Amino acid sequence: MRHAGGDDGDPAATVVRRSVSFAEAVYETAHVVEGVTARLARNIDQAAEVLQRGEIPVLVDPQTREALRLRPSVLVDAVMAKKNTGTQITDAPLVIGLGPGFTAGLDVHAVIETNRGHHLGRVIENGCAQPNTGIPGPVQGYTLERLVRAPVDGVFQACVEINRFVQAGELLGYVGDQPVRAGIAGLLRGLIREGTQVRRGLKIGDIDPRGEPEHGYTISDKARAVAGGVLEAVFYYRKQCCSTVDAYSKANES
């Protein structure tokens, strides 16, 4: 795990869509997303053991110090902080950055577009992703209304469970003594973990107006598109690398 943090790189695991995030393993020791198991590792030795079992190791490593000791062949910065929090193009043979904040060819080898629209999931070999708009993609016409944000700085206390239906105006919890209410009706597919310290304006919940129960337990279309872009970049750069090695070997043989 490159970071267990929120949008600003905070090392606390401020995850909203907890049901489909491997970060839940930080608190639950293990977590399954669509049949894939992730397990908390305390150090790189445990991480290697988890990999040997065919599971995904989750290592809380805000500065990436432990992770880089594994000498990864591919490093994906998925912090989504809208800025580079320290990743360098020399961190691995292939370094990929998600969304704005990275420049392909400068601090990463490739950037994956994360903004919804025609180019979502596109592999960018030179330049940057589209700038952050601050507005989520529309779902049945709702954009900002879908989000639940902290009204003040403080500790979040929940009054409802994640992945249940809520009504517009329904009480979801409190930050300090300030109530947090749903802006629209729908499936509460995202809700930050109770007891988390939050800041005013931080996204702490997500409501899906489509109301499909399975959407709470499966990754989104956007996440699949971005992941597909990462996979495309890995295959493309591996092919380029192998072609270069083969050409070099043939030149030496002749």
Image (cartoon, rainbow, N blue to C red):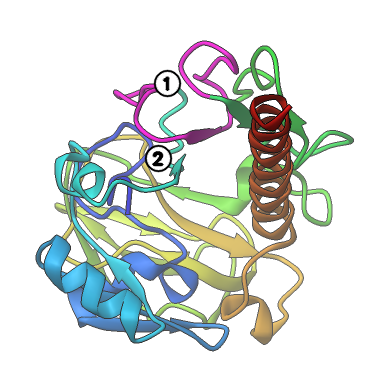
- The overriding secondary structure of the stretch rendered in magenta is loop
Mark sitting on residue 79: 2
Residue 169 seen by the camera: yes
Left or right: residue 109 compared with residue 39:
right
Left or right: residue 196 compared with residue 248:
left
Residue pictured at 36% horizontal, 40% vertical? 202
Give the amino acid type for the residue marked by disc 1 in the picture: Lys
Q: Is 249 within the magenta?
A: no
x, y percentage for residue 89? 43, 22
x, y percentage for residue 140? 83, 56
Q: Which residue is mark 1?
A: 83
x, y percentage for residue 252? 64, 26
**Residues in magenta?**
84-108
Residue 159 seen by the camera: no
Residue pictured at 62% horizontal, 69% vertical? 219
Left or right: residue 37 compared with residue 151:
right
